[in-house]
Amino acid sequence: MSKVKQIAQFGQELMALENIDNVLELISNEAKKLLNTERCSIFIVDKEDEILWTTLSDGVGRIVVSLNSGIVGDTYQKQEAQIVNLPYDDERFLSSIDKKSGYITKNIITVPIFDSQREVIGIIELLNKSRFSFDEKDLTTLTFFANYVSGSLELALMNRA
């Protein structure tokens, strides 16, 4: 099945969900399948408290970082995707999260999720692509995917309030 058909089929499932936790779980699972990665975290922007948080972070409990902390914070600040294939060599990498969880991050890709007003409402972060490093093709796929899920995520966040 082509990536576009795979995303379209996923979209039908996504449209049936309203609960934010179910929406996040479905988005996460699909993103991992699309790019063949071990883990996915979807960070939600909280401008009021100036944090990025995720309740869905494979193998780790809730993660909370400031809006300008780590690679996800840099993604939020610059409003652009990041590929980091050597995270331990990157000063932005928050190695303390790996230490706490016992996980070893080998590579990272992050893409902002924009709402209908072109404000960043979330960041998709994928870790440890199987067999290869992340590349521009992955960035194109994940950016398309983030644009595709943005409306559903925005609706789920509005229904949460």
Image: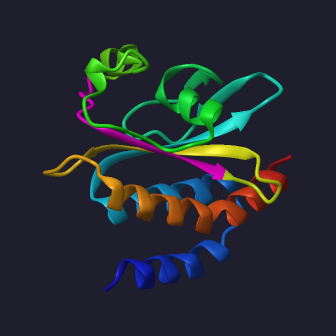
Residue 116 placed where, x, y %? Answer: 80, 60
Residue 61 against residue 90 in the figure, above or below: below
Q: Residue at x 75, y 32 (%)?
A: 46
Image-based side of 34 in relation to 115, left or right: left
Residue 137 against residue 37 in the figure, above or below: below
Q: Indicate how the structure is coloured in the image.
A: rainbow
Can residue 110 be seen here?
Answer: yes
Can residue 32 be seen here?
Answer: no
Front residue of this view, candidates 56 and 136: 136
Q: Residue at x 55, y 35 (%)?
A: 75
Front residue of this view, candidates 63 and 111: 111
In which quadrant of the rendered view does residue 31 lie? bottom left
Image-based side of 22 in relation to 136, left or right: right
Residue 23 placed where, x, y %? Answer: 61, 60
Residue 21 placed where, x, y %? Answer: 62, 52
Residue 57 against residue 149 in the figure, above or below: above
Image-based side of 147 in relation to 9, left or right: right
- Residues drawn in magenta: 102-113
Could you tell me how many numbered marks the image carries? Answer: 0
Task: Please tell me whether residue 18 belongs to the stretch shown in magenta.
Answer: no
Q: Residue at x 79, y 30 (%)?
A: 47
Q: Quadrant of the N terminus?
A: bottom left
Front residue of this view, candidates 81 and 24: 81
Residue lying farthest left? Answer: 131
Image-based side of 134 in relation to 68, left or right: left
Residue 58 placed where, x, y %? Answer: 40, 41
